Amino acid sequence: MAIRFSNRKTQRFYFKDGSDEKSYVIIYGDEVNTKSGASFKGAGYSKVEYRGRTGALKDYRLESGEKAADITKKRALEMYFLDVGQGDAAFVVTPDNRKILVDGGIKLTTTAEFLIWKYRLDKLANSLTINHLFLSHADEDHVKGLIEVLKHPRIKVEHVWHNGIARYASGFNQELGDVNNGILGTTHSSLDDLDGQHLAGTFKKWVDAVRAEGATYEALDSDSGHIDIGDPEIQIEITGPKKNAGGTLKWLGDKSHTINGHSLTFRLSHDHVRVFFSGDLNVKGSIHILDQPGAAPKLDSHVFKSPHHGSHEFHQALLNAVRPLITVVSSGDSPDHGHPRASFLGGIGRAGRANQHLVFSTEIAATFIDANDDEAHAEEVAGEVDPDLRFATALQNSQARKRFKKALPGLINIRSNGRELYAARRVMASYQWESYSPIEVSEFP
């Protein structure tokens, strides 16, 4: 077998289910394994394996003139924006197969269930290494779902990056630390910096999970510049938070605006394609970042993970600096904050660099299907399963995989070959995908 990747916007994968012939539609960048011998479809089809099933892809006339399945050896940059309800979670696979997780949502298990589904962790022989985990900030709707990822027995996390703001239960004059004269003076980088501190509930669970995992743990800010993630095709430049001299942070009025406005933000570049991850940036945080000399050009990007779930607290100048071709809004209806707000959608529409600027919303994309149909999940919700053993068995992982499959329509898929962008989301109709591609980024400088 040889690993290959779909080189078409969409193509249909045929397989046998007993005596019945069925099919899936696969999209650009999806991984298949080529297999020797004739396919069950006969002449004009290539034999391949996709997600554990052996089947067939139709042959196409290639540029060389030969006929074969339209697949390539080159892995695309894969980006998955998860439907985690009211929260954020995104997963990135680089062309060199490095894995990056950005936030984890507020639901305990959804991000872990996505990883179980994608990497078939219901199979005992399979495991996953996440090379880099970025926590934009420690609000529950970004950090809570990461705890189960760290605890999963077959997921290894190597490096954790964060914005340097902790949450404390006591010991300081604010939950985020000591605030004096408009300055948050309390920041941290290493786990050792938090020794002996009385940490707030979810943040303490997060820190304990990082300690148990043994991952490195380090704060980043705009002075960090570029960080090496181990893939020469990918550059990551840190754009926020912006620290004052002496390592302090500007207090942005209250704890919520401060932790949001000082989110860990960064731009990922893949050849000509640029992607901006904005955390929960708000008006004051955006102004603070844009006050840096030369800041605006560092935000210019084709793909934009929108700030703060598309809330009304956005800064139009930031949207204008990004000028996206594709925007993804991650939001939910429980609790209902009215996201994405109509004013944000109007603002991001104004800021786009194309007449057909694409705006995806995980909440709008989601299809509401009753997912509480197995007893094991009901027990977990009721708290009758030890959370440290939530994914300990193959059966639990199999049930988790089935649960996530029901949430697939809310998953936004974006792929890049460095020159073109492909975007798609699942639909329930027979054609299975709402897809847009290829988008040549050179046409939208």
Image (cartoon, rainbow, N blue to C red):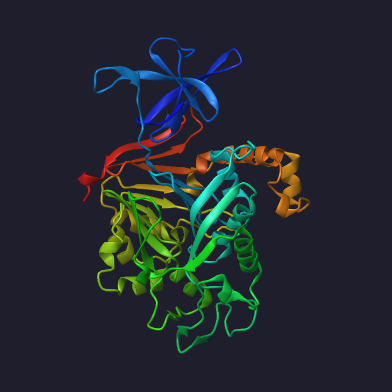
| Extreme residue in the bottom direction | 181
List x then y, in percent, for residue 82: 51, 48
Q: Residue at x 50, y 59 (%)?
A: 159
| Extreme residue in the top direction | 43
Q: Residue at x 45, y 44 (%)?
A: 412
List x then y, in percent, for residue 332: 54, 53
- Identify whether 359 is placed above or below 244: above
Q: Left or right? Give the position of 46 relative to 233.
A: right
- Identify whether 256 is placed above or below 340: below
Q: Residue at x 70, y 49 (%)?
A: 390
Q: Nearer the viewer, residue 156 or 184?
A: 156
Q: Left or right? Give the position of 406 relative to 429.
A: right
Q: Nearer the viewer, residue 67 or 323?
A: 67
Residue 373 seen anywhere in this rendered image of the structure: no
- Identify whether 79 is placed above or below 176: above
Residue 42 seen anywhere in this rendered image of the structure: yes
Total number of numbered discs in the rendering: 0
Q: Quadrant of residue 377?
A: top right
- Identify whether 320 is placed above or below 372: below
Q: Quadrant of residue 397?
A: top right
Q: Quadrant of residue 283?
A: bottom left
List x then y, in percent, for residue 258: 47, 74
List x then y, in percent, for residue 426: 48, 36
